[in-house]
Amino acid sequence: MNIILLSGGSGKRLWPLSNDVRSKQFIKIFKTKEEEYESMVQRVYRQIRTVDKEATVTIATSKTQVSSIHNQLGDGVSVCVEPCRRDTFPAIALAASYLHDVLHISEEEPVVVCPVDPYVNDDYFQALKELSGIADTGEANLVLMGIEPTYPSEKYGYVIPKDKNVVSRAAAFKEKPDVETAKEYISQGALWNGGVFAFKLKYVLKKAHELMDFTDYQDFFSKYDTLNKISFDYAVVEGEDNIQVMRFNGQWKDLGTWNTLTEAMEEPSIGKAILNDKCENVHVINELDVPVLCMGLKDIVVSASAEGILVSDKEQSSYIKPYVDKISQQIMFAEKSWGSFRVLDVEEESMTIKVTLNPGHGMNYHSHERRDETWSIISGRGTAIIDDEKRTVEAGDILTMKAGCRHTIMAETELKIIEVQKGRDISVNDKRKHELPGVE
């Protein structure tokens, strides 16, 4: 089975755990059998491998998510990176070209596309295999998965099949309705359009060539920023007459709001939290190293991270986005290719950061023109290179780098550092990369 997982969006509806560089699919809230926590993307990837160990899985995403994907799934996962955001059809077309030209998947192979973050059981991925098989027969150019609706939702589009068979021709597609219209659609046998579909690779490649003149994946990639933003539904689905839809009536949830996310939590709290016995339907996710105490609350979600603190009625939490859009501040936490960082303090001419480097990883060799830096090693071992001089570092060591000084550090074990930046113009743009010297 060939699967393209679409991983996009900033997930502002799950602020403060998600932001412009950390999307909801990377938040670790699901408890595993090993009593550890995994994220949505880890859960989905694990489930795919459980159902089909030989599946070719490619994640279509933006460059801001690549580090998080590799940190959580390993360096071996296949990633197709969008140079810029151009909506779902260009993203899927680019991924299709990647499958054909980079992974050398035959044009005759079926491909399944689905979001990276549904909350489902393994039967969903078994259904994806069936969807792939239907696409492989070639009876239809496009095969959609229609989710049996459990309530008249305003959040999803609808597809109306021609009959009640498990696999049917699609009679009509409907945009996101109001509740009363959704009830009418459901009375006609309509299914939720969950953004899951399958096709033969040659079908989307043909559509991509109709959209743009390109020779191969690299050429497509170089011209990507010239494309207009357009969704797969508008570019392909609405103009295609030969479409089948396959019913799916298993568990399927879109965990896009705090209300739906907390429904999937197996326990009332994650992190340091205390709830007294008067609390009802209260959930807490706390990423801070301080306790959160809740007393006598009902139907409340509390979420605390370095980005901020949310205390909300669960129903009202669905309307968070316009308020979060008004918040403008320094990104306080991010995953990088080498590990992660968390901002501890911001002053007018200084910033203090806790840096964690994963074993075997290191930063780029770089310098800053407008700030000095000091590294205090608080745990672990590694190697630092400062102005081409190499030295071993461990807990208790302090390194100072003046503006213009070239520097990097590489972790032998997990390495934790307190980094203090001092300068009048501290900016993420003040960074110049250098070629790493061949030092002994």
Image: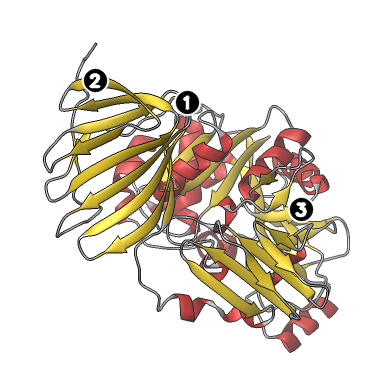
Rendering quarter of residue 270: bottom right
Residue 230 drawn at (x, y percent): 45, 63
Q: Which of marks 2 and 1 is nearer the N terminus?
A: 2
Question: Which corner quadrant holds the N terminus?
Answer: top right
Work out whether residue 405 can be spotted: yes
* Above-or-below relation of 54 to 378: above
406 vs 314, nearest the viewer: 406
Residue 110 drawn at (x, y percent): 65, 38
Q: What element carries label 2?
A: strand
Q: Tell whether 75 sits left or right of 147.
A: left
- Quick check: marks 2 and 1 in contact, CB under 8 Å? no
Disc 3 residue type (three-letter): Val
Disc 2 residue type (three-letter): Lys
Q: Is mark 1 on a helix, strand or loop?
A: loop
Residue pictured at 31% horizontal, 45% vertical: 419
Disc 1 residue type (three-letter): Thr
Q: Residues within 10 Å of mark 1 (few under 14, many from 20)?
A: some
User: CA–CA distance between discs 2 and 1?
Assistant: 17 Å
Q: Earlier in the sequence, mark 3 or mark 1?
A: 3
Residue pictured at 47% horizontal, 48% vertical: 61
138 vs 438, nearest the viewer: 438
How many marks do you count on the picture? Answer: 3
Q: Name the residue under label 1.
A: 413
* Above-or-below relation of 385 to 164: above
Residue 121 drawn at (x, y percent): 80, 49
Please tell me the numbered disc located at residue 396: none
| Residue ranking furthest to the front | 396
Q: How crowded is mark 2: few (under 14 residues within 10 Å), some or many (20 or more)?
A: some
Please tell me the numbered disc located at residue 120: 3
Please tell me the numbered disc located at residue 390: 2
Work out whether residue 365 can be spotted: no
